[in-house]
Amino acid sequence: MDEPKRKTKTSSAVKRRYNQKAYGAVTAYLPKEMAEAFKAKCAAEGISQAQIIKKAVEDFLNA
């Protein structure tokens, strides 16, 4: 008899270590109203906040 395939989950610690190795972080402090409006618009349009910021940085670097 075949045994059922075991489901595994990657631990948060493993994901965090990978992200620290593979990515750099950029922090921006915005006025609260602007940050809230940005988050709300991203949610309304179904777009991740990181996607918007990444695109802005790419556009800036390629200009």
Image (spheres, rainbow, N blue to C red):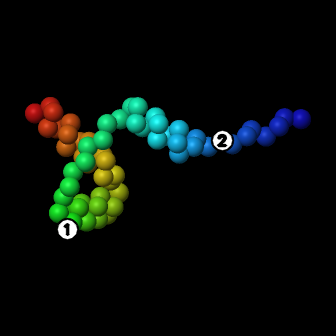
Residue 27 relative to residue 62: left or right = right
Nearer to the camera, 34 or 52: 34
Q: Is residue 7 left or right of residue 35?
A: right
- Where residue 48 appears, as percent x and y from the top left, is 34, 52
Residue lying at 14% horizontally and 38% vertically, measured from the top left: 60
- Outermost residue toward the bottom in this view: 33
Residue 8 or residue 32, whichever sits in front: 32
Q: Amino acid at mark 1?
A: Glu
x, y percent for residue 24: 31, 36
The answer to which of 52 and 12 lies nearer the viewer is: 12
Residues at discs 2 and 1 in contact (Cβ within 8 Å): no
Crowding at mark 2 (Cα within 10 Å: few <14, some 14-19, many 20+): few
How many marks on residues?
2
Q: Earlier in the sequence, mark 2 or mark 1?
A: 2
In the rendered image, which quarter contains the C terminus?
Answer: top left
Q: Give the residue pinned by disc 2.
A: 8
SS class of the residue under badge 2?
loop
Q: Which residue is mark 1?
A: 33
Residue 39: percent from left, percent from top: 29, 61
Could you tell me which secondary element the residue under label 1 belongs to?
Answer: helix
The answer to whether residue 32 is above or below residue 22 is below
Q: Is residue 9 left or right of residue 29?
A: right
Report the Cα–Cα distance between label 2 and label 1.
Answer: 41 Å
